[in-house]
Amino acid sequence: MHNRSRKTHNIVAATIGNTLEFYDFTVYAAFSTFLSQAYFPTGNPHLMLLLSTVIFGIGFLSRPIGAMVMGAYADRYGRKQAMTLTIWLMALGSLMIGVLPGYATLGLAAPLLLTLARLIQGFSAGGEMGSTTAFLVESSARDRVGLAASWQIATQNIGSIISGLGGIGLGACLSNTQLAGWGWRLPFLFGAIIAPVGFWIRRNVDETLHVGQTLHSMGTVISHLLTQMPGRIALCIMLVAGNTVAQYFFLYGTIFSIHDLHFPAAFSISINIALGVVGFPGALLGGYLADRYGPFRIVLVTRFLLCVLLVPAFMLLLAHPTPAVFTIVIMFLMSFHAVSTGACICLLPAMFPMKVRTLGTGLSYALGVTIFGGTAQPIFTMMIANTGNNLSWIYYVVGMLCISSLSLIFLWRMPGTRTTVACADR
């Protein structure tokens, strides 16, 4: 295969699972209102929505387990085998949600099985991130590591676009009654059928982990990382914290626009498209700029601008709560976040040598997302409900971005992280 074609194939193979993962998550976020009606019919709209977002958060609990198990597996037996397994697990979780009867049919078993499906999705997502990011940077040119890693973030936005288009299509074809009754299941079933395509693409990639670059067992991989590099893990967790809280701020925008601003469901779901349209090129731009100027400068500048602009932008929205203003504000803020995360992602694999790279990258990312991303939406919901202030949750996002950025100071002082040459030992 021609070199350029091989690189394109590697990117598609690595990111199709990531696209599916984020598609699943954005679909769940977008259809949380309908899921709450199907599985938590308490009669209290705030409580129903809160329970639905809690189940969304519970799915994050299995992400560190997936990152631990699949990360050690990928560092011992190869990125390719791990990537093949995780995409099948993603499909299983989506299929379960798509066919699971509601509370009216199964009673308490319905929300319990929904929780199990989210745990499976979380496990697969935890294993997917580390193996695909390691594969992307290890198969890239040395001066394009930042751009290669940024595809991990960019394709999350493709998932948003696909879920948004699906939401618009369903909104155009089905009534609200049909959406609430059974239409919300269709996007999850669509996600399940992507897996065979992803498997077919991934089976032909070249393995980037070779003999002589591995430790003796999965247990040795885990032990080596946890005993030799706990400080690096902690710093990476804090770095991820700001990204993930900001990301779920944008995801929660769909829920906020329906539940608090009372916009039509069809419009609110379409916001995923607007976020993806801005986020996809923005992330790639962040990776390109990281290769050229270094990731630290790009991340700090864009995070600073986002922190400064978040509150006044939402004050403008609350003063003029129209769909047009909401779209402009959310896309404007997303442009800074996308560049920041696209530049930031290459720092994670830079922190870990090849023999523990998948585990280190995946585990630190999964713990950051679990602790801070998994709790973000319930925190947002409770802050708005308890304070009655539609601006209260924005202060939490700003605070987490500021605290997270402190980790960059310590990362800057570590050897090998001032550039994006993350794979010197490949």
Image (tube, helix red, strand yellow):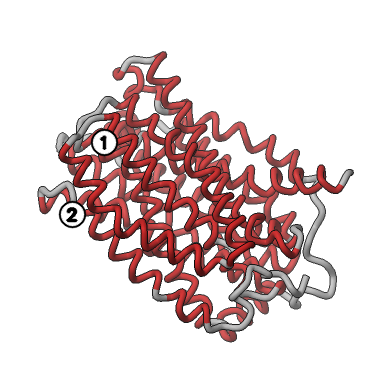
Vertical side of 200 occupied by 350: above or below: below
Asked if residue 335 shows in the view, the reply is yes
Q: Write the residue at 70% across / 68% down.
A: 75
Q: Write the residue at 45% across / 68% down.
A: 239
Question: Residue 242 appears in which quarter of the rendering?
Answer: bottom left
Which secondary structure, mark 2? helix
Q: Residues within 10 Å of mark 2 (few under 14, many from 20)?
A: some
Asked if residue 21 shows in the view, the reply is no
Q: Dot 2 corresponds to which residue? A: 392
Residue nearest the viewer, comparing 324 with 247: 324
Q: Write the residue at 73% across / 55% down.
A: 81
Q: Amino acid at mark 1?
A: Ser
Whichever of callouts 1 and 2 sits on the residue coming sooner in the sequence is 1
Q: Dot 1 corresponds to which residue? A: 257
Vertical side of 163 occupied by 150: above or below: below
Which label sits on residue 265? Answer: none
Residue nearest the viewer, comparing 14 with 223: 14
Residue 184 in the image: state x and y as whole percent.
Answer: 40, 27
User: Which residue is situated farthest in the bottom direction here?
Assistant: 228
User: Which residue is situated farthest in the right direction here?
Assistant: 1
Residue 25 in the image: state x and y as whole percent.
Answer: 45, 43
Q: In which quadrant will I find the N terminus?
A: top right
**From the viewer's perspective, is 236 left or right of 394?**
right
Question: Mark 1 and mark 2: span between their CA atoms?
Answer: 15 Å
Vertical side of 397 occupied by 300: above or below: below
Residue 371 in the image: state x and y as whole percent.
Answer: 38, 64
Q: Amino acid at mark 2?
A: Ser
Question: Residue 317 appears in which quarter of the rendering?
Answer: top left
